[in-house]
Amino acid sequence: MTVYTVRPFQSSQQEYEALASLLHAASPGGRPESGEDLEREDREWPTDSLMARVAAYSDGEEMVAVGACYEAYWQESPFTAHARFDTHPAHPQVQLLPALFEGVQGVLARHKGRFRRLVCRAKEDDRDRVDFLLRNGFQEAMRFPSSTLQLEAFDASVWAEAYDRLAQERIRPLTLSQFRTEEPDWKRRLRDLRWKIVQDVPSTEPFAKPSVAEFEEMVLGDPALVEEAFFIALSDGGALVGMSNLWRNDPEGRRLDAGLTGVIRSHRRRGIATALKLRTVEFAQANGAETIETSNEEGSPMLALNFKLGFESNPAWVDFVKELQA
């Protein structure tokens, strides 16, 4: 039987490379990041926000699992910590999860009284992980069904009326690259649009309004950003009223991931979101993608819209919450 040792992540170049390899094995469909990428992200993490890891090693000193405990600095949640567990598929997570969780609890113990709740996300069909969380005092708080659109079978022509309605509403769709060419103050205006929309996005914690610099770093600086797949709705009065976008986390581009789709409150129920979503689908088809994947909170209007467009349901992501003792 393999014996695993858990110890704090040392943040050396060698460990960052091992972490990158582990994360790719644990989530092969996720964005590939190098050790250098991960080290830079940690270095740029706000110094007043918690970010700590513990790593599990096999007998041969191979990193086989990592538990992270962090504050989501993009949320307005000073009393909430988040936990994330990544395990190599060749090693038993039923054996690794208790050790990683003990390590995370050790991190929290060093910040006793600072946090009141712990949030952890798991896929609903990962029964070992779900059962582990439930046994350890977590409760289901919010569900985010994931879904996939098979682009080969999608016929956008049946949705032509969506574009007609957009024209009737005198709404002009344009790409991010077009908008930043036309608008000198594009970063601030785009930040403001996203903030208006994101406040209505379901979440276990409220979001924090980013500065323009923070928005530039978190959104515009994301290497998966595709400017020609980032669509913005502009009213005839010049107001930004909606957005929808795709992200290239799959380096080969066969899968594109849907980002934030939304419309400001004053312009909802006018078909704007539908037309913008269709723009993203057409972009994906024209650029050789095979699927679009996304997830939405189970009561979100965006989930209903995705199903209407032909997205097929997959297992949901679930946010679990554990109340911590003071």
Image (cartoon, helix red, strand yellow):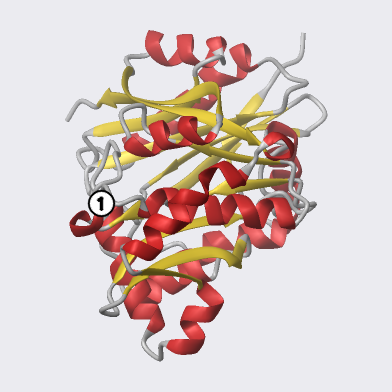
Q: Is residue 230 left or right of residue 210?
A: right
Q: Quadrant of the N terminus?
A: top right
- Residue 115 occupies which quadrant of the picture? top left
Q: Residue at x 45, y 73 (%)?
A: 216
Across and down, in percent, residue 162 comes to: 44, 51
Across and down, in percent, residue 292 comes to: 62, 42
Across and down, in percent, residue 93 comes to: 63, 17
Within-10-Å neighbours for mark 1: few <14, some 14–19, many 20+: few
Residue to which mark 1 is pinned: 268
Q: Residue at x 43, y 48 (%)?
A: 274
Q: Is residue 212 left or right of residue 155?
A: left
Amino acid, disc 1:
Arg
Q: Is residue 132 left or right of residue 82?
A: right
Q: Nearer the viewer, residue 286 or 186?
A: 286
Across and down, in percent, residue 90 comes to: 78, 21
Find numbered disc 1 in the image and state the secondary structure of the residue it sits on. Answer: loop
- Residue 210 occupies which quadrant of the picture? bottom left
Q: Quadrant of the C terminus?
A: top left
Q: Residue at x 71, y 28 (%)?
A: 88
Residue 8 appears in the rendering: yes
Query: Which residue lies most toward the right here?
Result: 60
